[in-house]
Image: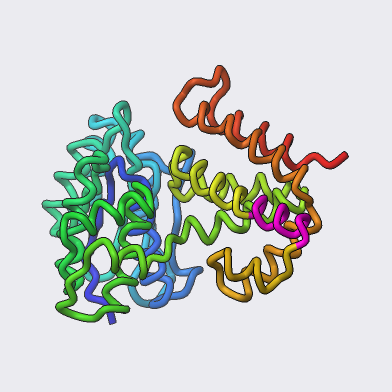
Amino acid sequence: MTAWLPAYLIHGDDHDRVAERRSRLKATAEAEVGAEGVEHLDGDASTPAAIADTLSAMTLGLGRRFVLVDGVERWKDDEVTARLVPVLKVLDGTTTTVAFVGMEDKKLQVPASLAGAVEKLGGAKVHEAALKSAQLPRWAKERASQLGIELDGAGAQALVQQVGERRVRLERELEKLALEYGPGARISTSEVEGAVADAAEQQVWGLVDAIVAGDRNAAVSSYLALRAQGEQLARLTGLLQSRMRQALELARRLEAGEDRQSISKAVRMSPWQFDRRLVEARDAGSATLAAAVDRIATLELAARGDSTLDPDTEAIRVIGAVTARR
């Protein structure tokens, strides 16, 4: 059974990591008392006064009581001091755990009075600050060391370049590397490139499949999913162009009369991938794929900020154009 503290404060401007810590804490609590045993307050129900009333109210539940509070970054110091602090001072930490979660930014910050009250109660404070791009390789090396592997500088740079700048995704890939290579392993660029196998590249194939098939909805959904997980438009554009040119090459070789065996020797690809891509290229035709490659080239302008449209708007517009079938 988990040794629970009376209070937790999870906050910071790295919203991914704040959300992940919140989810882990909530899942652990639900595993102990069931989903219905965790009281969740958010929105209009999340005010210092409302939380004070909730914590003061009697409960008929058995075992530890869990209260999860979101949105504390909107609270004011004076309200916390006047309404909530007195209740926290007398909170029975042997039977109740309250977790405060704050998604901070430059304008919204968790009140200092709440942080102080959690500390005085004997609770835990976790601050997740967003890192700048230049800080991520160093963080990756430190996190790799904590996982029992040694990641050199070049490998750390390669990891950030391949996976993107979201620490949640970087951590997942580091965990995979630790599992694959084992404790004490020394990881550099070649190991990163081989083990990560560029998840983005694999997912880009799904985007390519949808574009080649003329499936606009699937292509847009795939693109938005890649962007949502932190893929940079410039890098995504390069991967997409590379894969589309590969499909175009297959189509041109087919139309030139080359047989499957000779094409497979010229194109480096797994047998399963090759058969699938060959069928797609044949069905789409070189004219359609050539036009798509030309249109996708305009995404490079958007990635550099040269377009008058928002980069994602420009990307979706281009996807719509290249998936149109006359």
Q: Report whether residue 96 is seen.
A: no
Residue 308 in the image: above or below residue 321: above
Please state the horizontal and vertical placement of residue 116, each as a whole percent of the image.
14, 44
Please state the horizontal and vertical placement of residue 131, each as a whole percent of the image.
24, 42
In-front residue for pair 55/115: 115
Q: Report whether residue 98 is seen.
A: yes
Residue 156 in the image: above or below residue 326: below
Residue 137 in the image: above or below residue 280: above
State the quadrant of the N terminus. Answer: bottom left
Please state the horizontal and vertical placement of residue 112, each as a whole percent of the image.
18, 37
- Left/right of residue 219 with respect to residue 183 in the rendered view: right
> Does 236 appear in magenta?
no
> Residue shown at 75%/48% (left/top)?
286
Q: How is the image coloured?
A: rainbow
In-front residue for pair 22/148: 148
- Left/right of residue 156 with respect to residue 217 in the rendered view: left
